[in-house]
Amino acid sequence: MSQTPEKISSSPLHEQQILILDFGSQYTQNIARKVREAHVFCEIHPCTKPLSEIKTLRPKGIILSGGPASVLEKDAFLCDKNLFELGIPILGICYGMQLISHILNGTVSPAEDREYGRAQLNVQEDSGLLNGVKNNSTVWMSHGDFIKKLPTGFKSTAFTNNSPIAAIENPIKKIYGLQFHPEVVHTSCGTTLLNNFIFEICKCNKNWKTDSLAKYSIQNIKTQVGNGHVLCGLSGGVDSSVVAMLVHKAIGDRLTCIFVDNGLLRADERQKVEHEFRDNFQINLDVVDAADRFLEKLEGVSDPEKKRKIIGNTFIEIFEEEAKRLGNFEYLAQGTLYPDVIESISFKGGPSVVIKSHHNVGGLPEKMNLKLVEPLRELFKDEARKLGHEIGLPDTMINRQPFPGPGLAIRIIGNVTKDRLKVLREADTIIIEEIKIANLYNKLWQSFAVLLPVKTVGVMGDARTYENVIAIRAVTSSDGMTADWAHLPYELLAQLSNRIINEVKGVNRVVYDISSKPPGTIEWE
């Protein structure tokens, strides 16, 4: 199978862009999201991207990200000095600012103490970048080096108590630097700073909008596919649903979706998918009942990674079988998002060797020889949701909480059986019902039940019991990369516990998970 999609057509949406060169910062995706939230197209590229390719992209501006290393290290990742002679506005953030100084013959030195956390910014010079930024604004620092001597032509425009040089600029060459991170929420003036760079310095226009994206995506699919036929693995989640609708709007009945019921789904999941896509949207939908097949292969398996591999491989087998049975297809549509694309290229410029287990339909055999249609590969999750609204998907589908590809199997700690699935499914249904009643569903990133591999003693109806334990997991997050446990009202927790114990046969105890990510993960496996 082709591992890359066919080259997409050019679009006015891409005629202007901000280019981010990634030096390995944990916040790089935050920068891209902030730029796109300002309705300007933005892409992340490895810091090793050749200058000739950067020129070809013709960006309106370039942002040099932060990074975990020091520019003083022997093997530090630098950039071509000629980058600063292109006449393109440049903003360096943290490591990026130190990089500017280092390459342009300033002096960077190790700080006695690493500066991490909140600081108060003092503006000392008029600056286009700092326009509208108030004195004593809170900024987020995370660095171990500092600029000791500025390069020729630069001036310092702001400082903090621990950073005598917190912002620099050369307005003639339009090169700017910030020692702090404007892309994180802890920096109160971050949006103002980035907007000043994007609009006042780079002179960008606001043309990256979901209504334009919908028209562009549909037309692009028409151009790419022509008279061909497309196969799509439909899970019922946001990403695959948006992809299916886009492709259907582009080519109609030449799209066929395959939904595999693996027996590991939430209550009524299959019926909901069939109703929405087959009955409401009139999309060709092939439903495969493979529950017994999955459960047979999972019998006696408790290791979480083995579960994932079994589920992923079995899915691939079934998908391939169905594709052969249904006829000839030239294209495979899948819901690859921009974070997936970013993850495939390390900040060092090398390909990632890690492939997510059971992610989309990504591991289909090469012998299928299908060309990829990936209309969401330029989008973040929130952009995909907005696009879904534009093309008419219902809110109940667009605003669904994420659900793992391996389904309930990784929320059952230990062996997966029909009986244990029944217990978990019933408990999970109660949690979702009560979370919605409390009007918290759309405020939480995820909320679900986990079936633990232990039993505890209880007393029910004056009789001793020895039954299962259900853990409730509810978290808040903006992107799933970090998460905090949700501070659910005690009354809600009491209601959840009461209903689960009374209504789910085989459960006599309920606990609440109050761990954050990190150090934990959102899912238990």
Image (tube, rainbow, N blue to C red):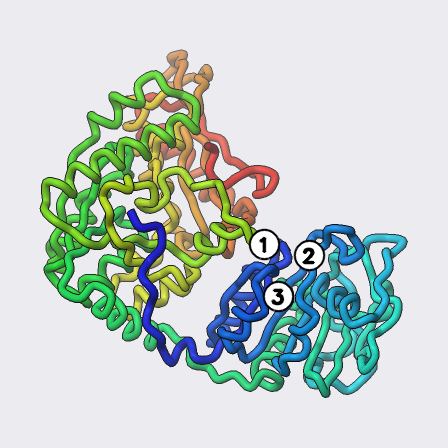
Residue 378 in the image: x percent, y percent? Answer: 41, 63
- Determine which quarter of the picture holds residue 90: bottom right
Q: Callout 2, which amino acid? A: Phe
As helix, strand or loop, the secondary structure at mark 1 comes to: loop
Contact, mark 2 vs mark 1 (Cβ under 8 Å): yes
For marks 2 and 3, give the one nearer the viewer: 2
Left or right side of 321 for 443? right
Left or right side of 482 for 439? left
Spatial separation of the CA atoms under disc 1 and disc 3:
18 Å
| As drawn, 458 above or below 84 | above
Q: Callout 3, which amino acid? A: Glu
Spatial separation of the CA atoms under disc 2 and disc 3:
21 Å
| As drawn, 314 above or below 10 | above
Give the number of the disc on residue 77.
Answer: 2
Residue matched to label 3: 183
Residue 222 in the image: x percent, y percent? Answer: 21, 69
For the point 28% across and 39% down, which residue is it? 365
As helix, strand or loop, the secondary structure at mark 2 comes to: loop
For the point 76% across and 65% down, which residue is it? 98
Extreme-front residue of the structure: 52
In front of the other: 506 or 406: 406
Left or right side of 254 for 515? right
For the point 15% across and 57% down, which residue is it? 229
- Determine which quarter of the picture holds residue 81: bottom right
Structural crowding at the residue carrying mark 1, measured as other residues with C-alpha within 10 Å and reported as few (<14), some (14–19) or many (≥20): many
Residue matched to label 1: 347
Give the number of the disc on residue 243.
Answer: none
